[in-house]
Image: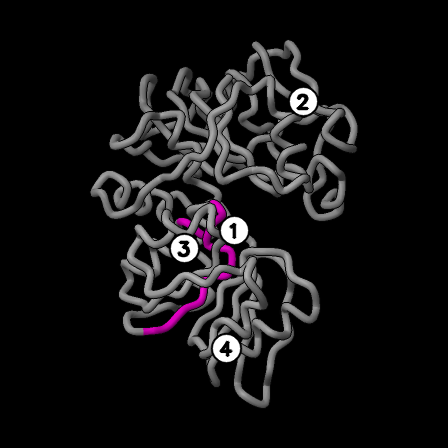
């Protein structure tokens, strides 16, 4: 089968589209025929070797932590799944990924794929959807009536975060550029701040119970975001760590998304019920993966990109 692998850490030129052996389902695994994977920023960080101490990889490595596809083979000791089932999953960081025609997946991370969208587009849901869910409800404890600022709402995680926060009954303010402002407004947010027009802290003009930061920020920008948290509130960051303001009772937390099949199934149920929209900015052949990594590094990815083998 064809897959993209890298045999050493480095820049995007280490990604090679090549012939590899098809995986075999081990005990507790299924082999999924991949309909699509998707690009996540952590894919590039892993490829660079920056996380080798935290997530040591066996090289050569197949990237791609998101998968949508169809079960093609069932291993020993597997119950509840059979050939032909359409599935999605957030794969283990250090396992062989889904940038391939087939991937072996532990059944503990599988969820049934949403029926309301084309199967390849479902690859845009697992990692980013779970990041948004865990940031809002596990770390921030978001509840109805709370105010929240989503900094970086135009990105893939941000799109899910504003939808989930709005459905939870929060009052949502979001930062976005003009390119994505209309899309964010379509989710019913209270207010959109154009972060390209000036400092967010100045434009906000108020404090929030929760600030969710989804973009890399300088120390000065991070401190300004902490200043936007109301007394006793929390800043949750998926990027830059933030200092607490103990004098005002402001807590901070950093979210590192984990695979959770039950939460992923809840997200799928919301998609099928029309309560959560999967947004795909681009669909590319898997052979273009290196170009996608380059576009991400240059800040030219407009949103979530899925890759089809």
Disc 2 or disc 4, which is closer to the eye? Answer: 4
Given residues 275 and 206, the one toward you in this image is 206
Marked residue nearer the N-terminal end (2 or 1) = 2
Check the image and name the residue furthest to the left. Answer: 273
Q: Residues within 10 Å of mark 2 (few under 14, many from 20)?
A: many
Which residue carries the number 2 mark?
Answer: 5
Residue 191 vertical placement versus 158 (above, below): below
Residue 157 is covered by the magenta coloring: yes
Which residue carries the number 3 mark?
Answer: 161
- At a point 55% along the width and 34% down the height, the residue shown is 39
Which secondary structure, mark 2?
A: strand
Describe residue 117's horizontal placement relative to residue 228 as left or right: left
Q: Answer whether residue 268 is visible to the viewer in this image.
A: yes
Indicate which disc residue 229 carries: 4
Residue 172 percent across, percent down from the top left:
36, 65
Q: Residues within 10 Å of mark 4 (few under 14, many from 20)?
A: many
Given residues 198 and 160, the one toward you in this image is 198
Residue 54 vertical placement versus 225 (above, below): above
Q: Residues within 10 Å of mark 1 (few under 14, many from 20)?
A: some
Disc 1 or disc 3, which is closer to the eye? Answer: 3
- At a point 64% along the width and 9% down the height, the residue shown is 19
Residue 93 vertical placement versus 245 (above, below): above
Describe residue 124's horizontal placement relative to residue 171 as left or right: right
Marked residue nearer the N-terminal end (1 or 3) = 3
Which residue carries the number 1 mark?
Answer: 257
Check the image and name the residue furthest to the front. Answer: 197
Which secondary structure, mark 4?
A: strand
> Which span is picked out in magenta?
146-159
In three-dimensional space, the C-alpha distance between marks 1 and 4, rounded to whole angstroms, equals: 23 Å
Marked residue nearer the N-terminal end (2 or 4) = 2
Residue 184 percent across, percent down from the top left:
38, 52
């Amino acid at each position: 089968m064809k897959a993209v692998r890298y045999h050493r850490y480095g820049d995007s030129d280490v990604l090679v589209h090549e012939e590899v052996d098809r995986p075999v389902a081990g005990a507790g695994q299924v082999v999924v025929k991949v309909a699509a994977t998707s690009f996540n920023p952590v894919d590039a960080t892993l490829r660079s070797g920056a996380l080798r101490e935290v997530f040591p990889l066996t090289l050569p490595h197949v990237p791609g932590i998101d998968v949508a596809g169809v079960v093609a083979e069932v291993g020993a000791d597997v119950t509840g799944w059979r050939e032909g089932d359409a599935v999605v999953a957030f794969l283990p960081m250090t396992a062989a990924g889904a940038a391939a025609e087939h991937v072996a997946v532990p059944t503990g991370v599988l969820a049934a794929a949403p029926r309301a969208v084309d199967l390849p587009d479902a690859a845009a849901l697992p990692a980013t959807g779970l990041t948004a869910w865990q940031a809002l409800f596990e770390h921030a404890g978001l509840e109805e009536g709370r105010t929240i600022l989503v900094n970086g709402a135009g990105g893939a995680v941000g799109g899910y975060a504003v939808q989930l926060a709005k459905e939870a009954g929060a009052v949502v303010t979001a930062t976005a550029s003009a390119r994505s402002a209309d899309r964010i407004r379509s989710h019913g947010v209270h207010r959109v701040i154009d972060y390209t027009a000036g400092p967010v802290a100045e434009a906000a003009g108020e404090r929030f119970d929760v600030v969710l930061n989804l973009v890399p920020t300088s120390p000065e920008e991070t401190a300004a975001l902490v200043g936007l948290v109301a007394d006793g509130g929390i800043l949750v960051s998926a990027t830059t760590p933030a200092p607490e303001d103990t004098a005002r009772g402001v807590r901070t937390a950093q979210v590192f998304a984990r695979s959770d099949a039950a939460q992923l199934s809840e997200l799928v149920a919301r998609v099928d019920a029309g309560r959560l929209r999967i947004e795909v900015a681009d669909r590319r052949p898997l052979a273009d993966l290196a170009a996608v990594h380059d576009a991400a590094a240059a800040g030219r990815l407009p949103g979530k990109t899925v890759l089809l083998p």
